[in-house]
């Protein structure tokens, strides 16, 4: 009887220990995932394109199979790019601002500004679900290869870029559009009131 109770007590201790270890492993896994996302985010901020850079054009298919050319902008026009991934929490927080700006560009009736999203998802189905779940109203494409993604410095997300004539970057921001000053600066560029084209990407607001 004593041996039975002793064995039962050992099993309970072992089960409790395993349960505690499982919680620790799950917590560490979640923290590691969050840290990896933050590292990608910081890499994007530190190595993103700068205004005044020139990027090459490329053609890509949307999720609906239509062809879009990124970076080939007619004189006087602009192309607004949103670089995202479906698993990026910063993208999700920026998405309402992106959608609002894209909707205003479409409702203005002007074709001067075209809006294109670029997904860094490795699986197209993940992007498709993201588009459906969040009712994204602008076309989404993917880079044709890793080389082109590198040229566009798409090392992390979210990234907002405005391209002008001959592939020149006239505005860029790595990180969330999380404050009114950042949104106002983007709107000014889209309205044709851009500032110094040599100014670099604005840093993410960390307040």
Image (cartoon, grey):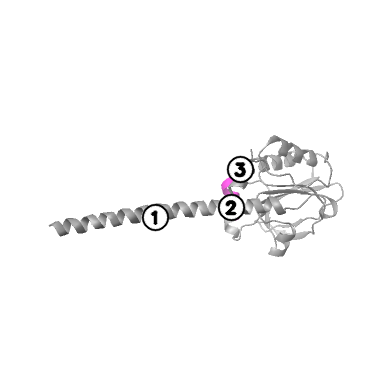
| Residue identified by numbered label 2 | 37
State the SS at label 1: helix
Local SS, label 2: helix
Mark 1 vs mark 2, CA separation in Å:
23 Å
Dot in front, 3 or 2: 2
Position of 193 compared to 15: left or right? right
- Which quadrant holds the N terminus? bottom left
Q: Residue furthest right?
A: 75
Tell me, for residue 141, which label it has, or none. none
* Residue 197 position within the rendered picture, expressed as x and y whole percent measured from the top left: 83, 46
Residue receiving disc 1? 22
Q: At x 21% / y 59%, what residue is drawn?
A: 7
Dot 1 crowding, Cα within 10 Å, few <14, some 14–19, many 20+: few
For label 3, the crowd category at 10 Å Cα-Cα, with few meaning under 14, some 14 to 19 and many 20 or more, is some
Please, what is the dominant secondary structure of the magenta stretch? Answer: helix
92 on left or right of 181: left
Front-lying residue, 200 or 69: 200
- List x then y, in percent, for residue 169: 80, 51
Q: Where residue 180 sits in the image (x, y, percent)?
A: 70, 35
């Amino acid at each position: 009887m004593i041996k039975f109770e002793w064995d039962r007590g050992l099993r309970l201790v072992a089960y409790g220990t395993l349960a505690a270890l499982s919680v620790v492993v799950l917590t560490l896994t979640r923290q590691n995932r969050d840290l990896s996302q933050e590292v990608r985010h910081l890499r994007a901020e530190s190595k993103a394109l700068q205004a005044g850079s020139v990027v090459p054009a490329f053609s890509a298919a949307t999720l609906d199979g239509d062809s879009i050319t990124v970076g080939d902008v007619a004189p006087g026009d602009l192309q607004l790019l949103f670089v995202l991934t479906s698993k990026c929490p910063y993208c999700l927080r920026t998405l309402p601002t992106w959608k609002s700006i894209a909707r205003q560009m479409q409702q203005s009736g002007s074709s001067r500004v075209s809006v294109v999203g670029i997904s860094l998802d490795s699986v197209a189905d993940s992007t498709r679900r993201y588009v459906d779940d969040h009712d994204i109203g602008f076309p989404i494409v993917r880079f044709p290869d890793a080389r082109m993604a590198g040229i566009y410095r798409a090392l992390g997300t979210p990234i907002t870029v405005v391209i002008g004539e001959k592939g020149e970057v006239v505005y860029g921001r790595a990180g969330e559009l999380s404050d009114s000053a950042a949104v106002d600066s983007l709107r000014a560029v889209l309205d044709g009131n851009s500032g110094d084209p040599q100014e670099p990407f604005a840093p993410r607001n960390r307040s």
